[in-house]
């Protein structure tokens, strides 16, 4: 295989990660045009070619160097033992890889730790490598049955327990399974091939891509808050604002007070707005942000 040193080869995920990744790119100003039944979308980034692949294949292509940068789950990077460069954790699709067994198999629970029978057990999982290592650490033996989806149906008839990824645990609970341990936490992340990362030109382009994606993720967490306040309340208002550095302050017409503006964490609004009102803030306006680059 011959590789161009100037074209950035981007791998985009197929499946459950695709919607979130495509939305993230779109909000960052990157346009994608995916032909019907096609896997090679046109992308607006200069000197960049994109291909849609399954996340597991993205990891393998990054490891071999046939792709320079791509999105994949941390769970499968760990399962495949791939030596990749993690560039950005998007926080999208957060899941936990957990071990779960039927409730009847739990011998006792003490201080949140659930004990399993001290005997060899059979576990079903798509994550054979990680599960085998966990079984050896827990003294459960090393017999792991590979599953190809719907892992939760294996126990109790065809396996003593399972390991699987879960967001809420509701599917496991619906199938009579109880979580006994957490193997790792995963999310959609941007990874680079070590080969591409070692080349200054490609590394700079990968870092630039991470900057614009991070700006969208930061903007999703924040809103622009604007308010007015009298001069004698300015200090109290500024002290109450959890801004990124310092708030932007401008004088109102006829020196009638000040206008204050800051990008604040969205999750703090329920507490922050009453606090600002109490501090003397008025005419509070909240606006969404598109991108924030610290």
Image (spheres, helix red, strand yellow):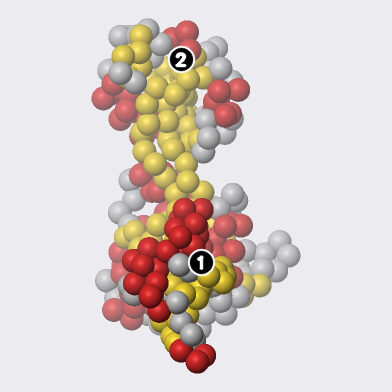
- Using the image as rendered, state which of residue 189 and residue 279 is in the foreground: 279
Q: Write the residue at 44% across / 28% down.
A: 163
Location of residue 255 with respect to 49 vertically, above or below: below
Closer mark to the observer between disc 2 and disc 1: 1
* Mark 2 and mark 1: Cα distance apart in space: 48 Å
Relative to residue 8, is residue 42 drawn left or right?
A: right
Helix, strand or loop under label 2: loop
Quadrant housing the N terminus: bottom left
Binning the other alpha carbons within 10 Å of mark 2 as few (below 14), some (14 to 19) or many (20 upward) gives some
Query: Which labelled disc corresponds to residue 160?
Result: 2
Binning the other alpha carbons within 10 Å of mark 1 as few (below 14), some (14 to 19) or many (20 upward) gives many
Q: Write the residue at 54% across / 25% down.
A: 172
Provide residue 178's location: percent of width, then percent of height: 47, 20
Provide residue 107's location: percent of width, then percent of height: 37, 7
Tell me which numbered mark, 2 or 1, is placed earlier along the sequence: 2
- Using the image as rendered, state which of residue 77 and residue 238 is in the foreground: 238
**Residue 221 visible from this viewpoint:** no
Helix, strand or loop under label 1: strand
Q: Write the residue at 40% across / 48% down.
A: 74
Provide residue 127's location: percent of width, then percent of height: 43, 35
Query: Which labelled disc corresponds to residue 83?
Result: none
**For residue 238, which quarter of the picture?**
bottom left
Location of residue 219 with respect to 180 vertically, above or below: below
Residue matched to label 1: 223
Q: Write the residue at 34% across / 72% down.
A: 235
**Residue 181 visible from this viewpoint:** yes
Provide residue 207's location: percent of width, then percent of height: 36, 73
Location of residue 212 with respect to 278 vertically, above or below: below
Q: How many marks on residues?
A: 2
């Amino acid at each position: 295989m011959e590789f161009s040193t100037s074209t950035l080869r981007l791998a985009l995920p197929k499946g459950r990660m695709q919607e979130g990744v495509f939305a993230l790119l779109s909000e960052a100003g990157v346009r994608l045009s995916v032909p019907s039944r096609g896997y090679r979308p046109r992308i607006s980034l200069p000197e960049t070619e994109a291909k849609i692949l399954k996340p597991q294949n993205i990891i393998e292509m990054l490891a071999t160097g046939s792709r320079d940068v791509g999105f994949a789950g941390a769970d499968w990077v760990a399962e495949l033992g791939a030596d990749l460069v993690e560039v950005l954790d998007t926080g999208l699709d957060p899941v936990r890889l957990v071990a779960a067994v039927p409730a009847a198999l739990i011998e006792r629970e003490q201080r949140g730790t659930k004990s399993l029978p001290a005997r060899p057990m059979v576990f079903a999982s798509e994550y054979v490598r990680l599960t085998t290592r966990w079984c050896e650490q827990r003294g459960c033996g090393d017999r792991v049955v590979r599953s190809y989806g719907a892992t939760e149906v294996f126990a109790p008839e065809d396996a003593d327990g399972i390991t699987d990824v879960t967001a809420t645990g509701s599917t496991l609970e619906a199938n009579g399974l109880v979580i006994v341990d957490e193997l790792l936490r995963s999310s959609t992340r941007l990874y680079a091939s070590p080969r591409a990362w070692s080349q200054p030109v490609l590394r700079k382009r990968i870092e630039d891509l991470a900057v614009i994606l991070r700006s969208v993720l930061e903007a999703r967490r924040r809103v622009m808050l604007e308010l007015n306040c009298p001069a004698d309340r300015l200090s109290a208002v500024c002290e109450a604002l959890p801004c990124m550095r310092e708030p932007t302050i401008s004088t109102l017409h006829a020196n009638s007070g000040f206008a204050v503006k800051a990008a604040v964490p969205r999750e703090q609004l329920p507490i922050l707005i009453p606090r600002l009102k109490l501090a003397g803030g008025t005419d509070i306006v909240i606006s969404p942000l598109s991108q924030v680059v610290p």
